[in-house]
Image (cartoon, coloured by chain):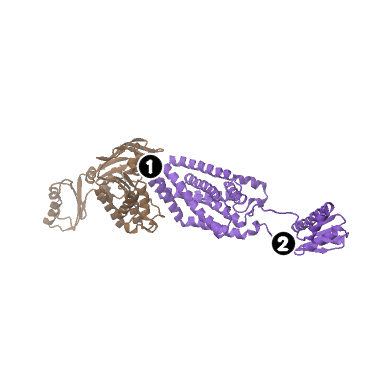
Chain colours: A brown, B purple
């Protein structure tokens, strides 16, 4: 079932086209990664999904309902984790969570239980009655998430929830995202950190200039940009290497020799690293270092957009 | 219910803010205490003067001179020194040299008074004293002509008072404490507009406003809740200041506290609406604060918050003061408390509430078009 269905979305700010015929689908149970450099249109797309701004053209259905026709139903079932830490410093962690949860209609016991569950989920239950002014950046980020999940939304939209925090807090948040997904929430996750998308996203869309330039699983995206793997082997001397014998190994397409390193390029679908290593051992050529080069999402992104993700 | 929860959050955040407590509770208490005591002489209507010197010369030993001798004796306990000066020219020169406040020449049936115009206050006091004598003398003369028997009983009582004074309202004039209790409270209420502007700006800066809008909440609910929250918080603060002024400083607020608080609430509504609208119009919080910090002292001055405008004796300022809502608010409160006069109340309520409604309308219009 498609939780989010966006079709031909267009949004302009003056002469700038923020969304250029954007179309995407998010299926139930997915962690859908939305990657793109600054200005790609990710936040604009999210703001339209949340009902903060309206599109100039196009259609968005969430849970099968048009967002302009049934905004309250959709908002009730969405949790939005904004990019900025949007909390009240004068209220305690519990009061923050409880206040935002109350806006989703939670009252009485349900409000209390939902707030406690959210704080426990992000590991702040022992600091519930402290004001966030004394929290670290990571703790504030976790509270930022807690404020969005107390009403147990079916769809959680996270806009770069790990910006500027320590690795420990980041790991905690990534684990939380996985747990939320396992508990039944569909998640849309935007990030600048490629390794985060690789670690948690079941499907990834790469956005640039207001549209999706590629979409699929990590492997599918990697296959878009290359069908070869490379291995670079460092040895003491190249004298004993027989280039023809190496080229006879199944799958090897090309060999480049530079001083004491040799770069061997093979077809991606053929596993031949063991045969290459065996050749060096049987030829009595001592190997000093082996480096396997496989395309990652950063390579994919660079290839598709011409710029690095954090540009 | 969304309105209730947002309002509750607003009240909590305002009342927990240390700067707000200092600004809206401690500052007015401090100001009304200091100004109330420091300027007490300006308001209580009494001043201590030194001795008043009145020189006199009796040209004739007739009835008027005899009456004046009796009058001098009756003033023995007053702070007036009567000095006999037989030489008229000498007496006149002494007045010119400010040696005497006045010089009085008593004739057979008339009095001639010479006074020093440089020392005008003392001259006026002396003139008032002598007028009292002349009035008394004329009255007795008239009684002697028409009813000589009655004159006997009057002259036999040295404390006989010719005028009965009946006090209609014991607390007719506000003391300095009374004045500054009212004017400082209404002044500080205007400063709650800065708190209101800050709540709008901080929702914008902290992005909590945007976060609220991602929830199933209507914009009008947010605006209404914020407006009501600010009003309730300001009312709580006003109540604390009111209780302090009434029970600790002993300020007089009159007997109709409900009407007084109705006027105060209308002023709070105006101040809150002003702050909310400035918060929406001016996106930069420092600029918004600066604007209000400049505007409030101006309307406060015209409202008589610092000193009563009447002491300036300027018709232009009195006319200009009509543009200050604070003037109408203060007038209404003072008139109810000190004259039991409600005529200014409808005008004060109308000015505050119409301005509040207009400003909220502007805020709603801006909020409708953009998200914080």
Q: Residue at x 52, y 58 (%)?
A: B26
- Position of residue B363 relative to residue B126, above or below, is above
Chain for mark 2?
Answer: B
Quadrant of the rendering where the C terminus of chain B is positioned: top left
Q: Nearer the viewer, residue B159 or B91?
A: B159
The residue that label 1 is drawn on is A52
- Position of residue B86 relative to residue A277, above or below, is below
Classed neighbour count for the residue bearing mark 1: other residues with Cα under 10 Å, few (<14), some (14–19), many (≥20): some
Q: Nearer the viewer, residue B191 or B172?
A: B172
The residue that label 2 is drawn on is B49
Q: Could one spot residue A96 in this view of the protein? A: yes
The residues bearing labels 2 and 1 have C-alpha atoms spaced at a distance of 73 Å
Q: Position of residue A28 (x, y in %)?
A: 25, 43
Q: Please give left or right for residue B162 compared with residue B15 in the image.
A: right
Chain for mark 1?
Answer: A
Quadrant of the rendering where the N terminus of chain B is positioned: top left
């Amino acid at each position: 079932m498609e939780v989010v269905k966006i079709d031909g979305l267009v949004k302009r700010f003056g002469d700038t086209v923020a969304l250029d015929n954007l179309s995407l689908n998010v299926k139930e149970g997915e962690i859908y990664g939305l990657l793109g450099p600054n200005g790609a249109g990710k936040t604009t797309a999210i703001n339209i999904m949340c009902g903060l701004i309206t599109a100039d053209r196009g259609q968005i259905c969430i849970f099968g309902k048009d967002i302009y026709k049934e905004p309250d139903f959709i908002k009730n079932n969405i949790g939005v984790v904004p990019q900025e830490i949007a909390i009240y410093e004068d209220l305690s962690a519990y009061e923050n969570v409880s206040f935002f949860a109350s806006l989703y209609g939670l009252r009485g016991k349900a409000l209390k239980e939902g707030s406690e569950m959210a704080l426990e989920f992000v590991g702040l239950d022992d600091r519930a009655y402290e004001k966030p002014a004394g929290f670290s950046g990571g703790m504030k980020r976790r509270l930022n998430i807690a404020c969005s999940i107390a009403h147990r939304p079916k769809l959680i939209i996270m806009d770069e929830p790990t910006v500027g925090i320590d690795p420990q807090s980041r790991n905690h948040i990534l684990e939380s995202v996985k747990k939320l997904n396992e508990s039944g929430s569909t998640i849309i996750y935007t990030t600048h950190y490629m390794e985060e998308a690789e670690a948690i996203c079941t499907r990834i869309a790469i956005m640039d200039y207001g549209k999706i330039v590629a979409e699929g699983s990590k492997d599918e995206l990697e296959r878009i940009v290359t069908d070869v793997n490379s291995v670079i082997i460092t040895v003491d001397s190249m004298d004993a290497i027989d280039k023809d014998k190496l080229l006879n190994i199944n799958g090897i397409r090309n060999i480049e020799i530079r001083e004491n390193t040799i770069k061997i390029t093979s077809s991606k679908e053929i596993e031949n690293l063991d045969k290459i290593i065996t050749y060096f051992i049987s030829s009595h050529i001592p190997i000093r270092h082996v480096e396997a080069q496989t395309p990652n999402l950063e390579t994919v992104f660079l290839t598709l957009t011409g710029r690095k993700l954090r540009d | 219910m969304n309105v209730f929860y947002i309002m509750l959050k607003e009240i909590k955040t305002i009342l927990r803010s240390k700067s707000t407590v200092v600004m809206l509770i401690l500052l007015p208490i401090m100001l009304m205490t200091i100004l109330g005591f420091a300027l007490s002489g300006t308001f209580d209507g009494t001043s201590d003067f030194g001795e008043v010197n009145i020189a006199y010369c009796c040209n004739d030993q007739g009835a008027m001179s005899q009456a004046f001798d009796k009058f001098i004796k009756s003033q023995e306990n007053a702070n007036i020194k009567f000095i006999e000066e037989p030489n008229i020219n000498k007496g006149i020169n002494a007045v010119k040299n400010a040696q005497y406040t006045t010089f009085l020449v008593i004739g057979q049936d008339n009095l001639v008074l010479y006074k020093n115009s440089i020392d005008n206050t003392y001259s006026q006091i002396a003139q008032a004293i002598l007028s009292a004598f002349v009035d008394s003398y004329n009255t007795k003369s008239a009684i002697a002509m028409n009813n000589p028997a009655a004159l006997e009983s009057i002259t036999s009582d040295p404390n006989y008072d010719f005028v009965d004074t009946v006090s209609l309202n014991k607390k007719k004039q506000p003391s300095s404490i009374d004045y500054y209790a009212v004017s400082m409270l209404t002044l500080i209420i205007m400063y709650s507009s800065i708190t209101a502007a800050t709540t709008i700006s901080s929702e914008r800066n902290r992005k909590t406003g945007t976060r609220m809008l991602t929830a199933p909440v209507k914009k009008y609910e947010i605006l209404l809740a914020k407006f009501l929250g600010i009003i309730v918080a300001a009312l709580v603060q006003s109540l604390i200041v009111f209780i302090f002024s009434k029970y600790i400083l002993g300020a007089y607020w009159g007997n109709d506290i409900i009407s007084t608080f109705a006027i105060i609430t209308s002023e709070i509504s105006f101040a809150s609406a002003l702050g909310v609208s400035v918060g929406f119009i001016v996106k930069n919080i420092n600029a918004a604060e600066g604007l209000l910090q400049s505007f409030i002292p101006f309307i406060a001055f015209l409202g008589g918050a610092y000193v009563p405008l009447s002491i300036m004796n300027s018709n232009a300022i009195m006319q200009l003061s009509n543009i200050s809502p604070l003037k109408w608010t203060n007038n209404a409160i003072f008139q109810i408390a000190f004259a039991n006069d409600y005529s200014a109340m409808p005008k004060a309520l109308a000015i505050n509430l119409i301005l509040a409604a207009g400003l909220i309308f502007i805020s709603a219009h801006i909020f409708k078009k953009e998200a914080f």
